Every structure is written in structure tokens, then in C-alpha cells.
Image (cartoon, helix red, strand yellow):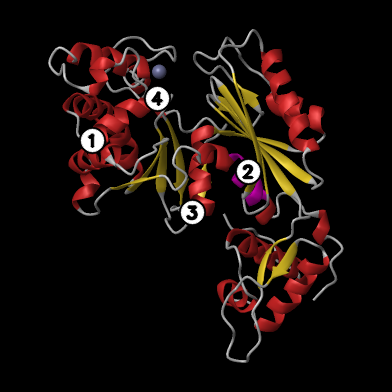
Amino acid sequence: MKSDTGSNIQNVKASNRILALKHIAIHKGMSRIELARITGLSKMTAVNIVNELLAADLITETDTLSSITTSGRKPVSLTLSPNSPCICGILIKRELIQIILSDLGCNIFYQEEFHYKELSSSDELLSMIENLYRRCSASTDRRILAIGISCLGPLDTSRGLILDPPLFYGIKNLPIVSIIEEMTGLPVFLVHDATAGAFSEKLLGIGRNITNFVYLHIINGIGAGLVLNNALYDGDTGQSGEIEHTCIDFHGPACSCGSHGCLGLYTGIDHLRARIQELSVIYPGSPLSMLPFPEWRDIITAGNHRDPLALTVLEEFCSYIAYALTSTLSLLNLSTVIVGYSSDNDGDIIEELLSYKLNTHVMSAKYQPITVTHSSFKGNAPLIGSVAIIADKVFSKLLPLKELENTSSL
Ligand SMILES: [Zn+2]
């Protein structure tokens, strides 16, 4: 909804500065002329803003552009200053915590991770995060603006709570935002991991020029993030994206959510391993038949090599997802699906199978084919999203940059 209030000249100038900073952060190595072109600002205004951002040490000049202009002057490119403020991002998974530091362009310059098998309590989780954060913050002299936490759901992002993720060691209603804020003294924002994935695609990835799409994270649980009308859709309380609890068989087994036959009951790695074991009798020569505990990577790699057993299992897997996703795509009239999962090879069997099924099942596909494409960040979109969500708050002026507060007026 548009604001009912007007903008005074100072607001316009502040908006122009932050817009310029956003483009310099995201499009690395931009010249002043390119900045003026992409922002629509006059060259004089762009030059003045660049001078202000240089004076605030938010950006710096490099002469990495190789060409010489027609005037004979060597063009310089603009990039974020190595002294500019940075962002901390944390990704919480069932058996892994990752922490990163990035600049405002979401370029990571510090990364650490900690693997664990189980948690005795929420205190153990918080202690791990505190230790990781202490090492992370001690590694840099840059000011950390805020912390973005990308976490498995369900969450209540409006109240900063991890609600009760299944198989998450009994952790329930953990007010992680207020605890980490008190621990660090920084603003903290919580986001569903799949929603964070969608956001990283929108700000930095292949979703940048796509108005509406769904991001689907499919490994170790299935989550969906929605971008509608160029904006992240997070739901009333931040619990959107729980596609695992879409019913695909109302006669199916009971689910912990209270429903029956939910998608997540059919797409876990244990379910796929059981199917591989059953099918090994039919396909004894499959490389998957030789493995006692095939991992996702093994299954996808075998599928990309057109192994019949892997293809059968993945065809079922994608059928389940397509049943659940068809409802969402039809309801919202979406025609782009971005799929995130780790993959070391260039195969696209998941995208191929999903594309076929969705284009067969979704009514609107007769008029606008459904495009299914692999994530720009492979399996890392939820991690990148943890910092992208903070960068966007800066670029949207929801998180003020004190470095810009004392800049002179244009
Ligand atoms: Zn359920």
C-alpha cells in the first residue's frame, strides 16, 4: 500500500543515497556513469552522491576496469569499502549451525560451521551460537549492523520464536530473537529458511527480474518461500512456507501437525532409503543397491546418470512434491519455481521431472508454461538469505546506517 504521507527534499536525498549504495553493493565494479544510468539519477547527482559515500568510507574506488574511455581517462569502478559495516548471518539446521559475515552486497568474508548430532536442551543450542558469534565478531574490525537468523520452521517471526520444529530435540517456543539481541546488543531478525532462500534469489539471484515465484528447498525437509509482486510473502506470523504440511493423501498416516498424509511424510531420506531397498530386488545392478545408507547426493547423482532405480525413486519423490505444489501454483497463478539443493554436478534430473509433472498438472501451464530452474546458490540460498534479509532492511531504510546520518546535503 502506498504511503499517504509526502516526501520532503531530505527524504528524497536520503533515498537516493541508499539507492546508489544498493546498486554499488550488488553490482560489483560499477562506474559513476553506470550508476547514473541504472538509478535514473542525473550524472551530477550521481557524482555528488558518490562523493558523499566515499567521504563516509562506505565505498571505495578501484581502477580494475580495463578499458580506457574515449576521453583517455582511465575509468574507476566503485565497490564497497573494506571498512564499511557488515552483516552477521546464522543458519540453524537440525544437525548444523553455520555463521557468516558479509558486506552489504552479501559477499561472504568469514564463515564457520559446527556439526552436532543432538541437543540436550535449548541452552546447548544457544551456547553453540554464542561461541560461534564470539569468534566471528572477534575476527573483524568492521561494525556489525545486525544479525539475520535463518532457521527451520515452524517459526513465529512476528514474536521472534522458534515454535516446535519436528525432530528438533524437543526445543519449543524458544524466544531466540530476544535472547540473541541481549547476548550481542545487536538487532536480530528471524526468518524461515526457505523464505530466506526465496529472498536471496530475489535480491541477488535469478529471481531478481521475476515478479512472482516460489523457491523450493528440497533436501532435509521441504520448505517453500514465496515472492509475490516483487515482495517477500511471510504470512501473518511468519509461518508461510510449511509446504511439508500440505496434505497429499487425506487417507494417509497421521502427521504431527494434526492432519493426515502430509507431504513431509513421503519425502524424507528414510522414506527414500526404504523405497531403494524395496526396488533393489528389481534393479540389483544399481549403484544405490550397493550402498547401505544412500545419501541425497548419491540418489541425485545416480538420477543424473539415468540409473533406473534412482529415476524411479526420484520420479515418485517429484510426484509427491508436484501434488503439493500444484495447489500453490494454481491458487496463486505462479509460473516460476526455483529449486534449491546441494549438487556437485551439472545434471538437472530434479528440475526435469518436476517441470514435466507441473506442466502436466497445473491448469495455467496450458497458457503460460511452468519454468523450473535450479537455485543460483545451489544449496546455500537459505544461508545467503540470512544476510540478504538484513541488507534489504538497510536498502529499504528500515535499518538506519549511522554512517549516512552526517552526510552533507546535496
Ligand atoms: Zn503435517
Q: Secondary structure at mark 4?
A: helix
Which mark is drawn over residue 244?
4
Q: Give the CA separation, mark 1 to mark 2.
A: 35 Å
Q: Give the CA separation, mark 2 to mark 3.
A: 18 Å
Estimate how packed mark 3 is, as few (under 14), some (14 to 19) or many (20 or more) residues with alpha carbons within 10 Å: some
Report the residue marked by disc 3: 230
**Amino acid at pointer 3:** Asn
- Tell me the quarter of the picture where residue 349 sits: top left
Q: Nearer the viewer, mark 2 or mark 3?
A: 2
Q: Residues in magenta?
A: 386-393
Sequence-wise, which precedes: disc 1 or disc 4?
4
Sequence-wise, which precedes: disc 4 or disc 3?
3
Q: What is the quadrant of the N terminus in the image?
A: bottom right
**Amino acid at pointer 1:** His
Q: Nearer the viewer, mark 1 or mark 4?
A: 1
Q: Is residue 106 visible?
A: yes
Left or right of residue 66: residue 194 = left
User: Residue 322: x percent and y percent?
Assistant: 27, 33
Check residue 238 for magenta coloring. no
Q: Is residue 56 above or below residue 380?
A: below
Q: Is residue 251 visible?
A: no
Estimate how packed mark 4 is, as few (under 14), some (14 to 19) or many (20 or more) residues with alpha carbons within 10 Å: many
Q: Secondary structure at mark 2?
A: helix
Report the residue marked by disc 2: 387
Q: Nearer the viewer, mark 4 or mark 2?
A: 2
User: Any atom of ligand 1 within 8 Å of the CB at mark 4?
Assistant: yes
Report the residue marked by disc 1: 305
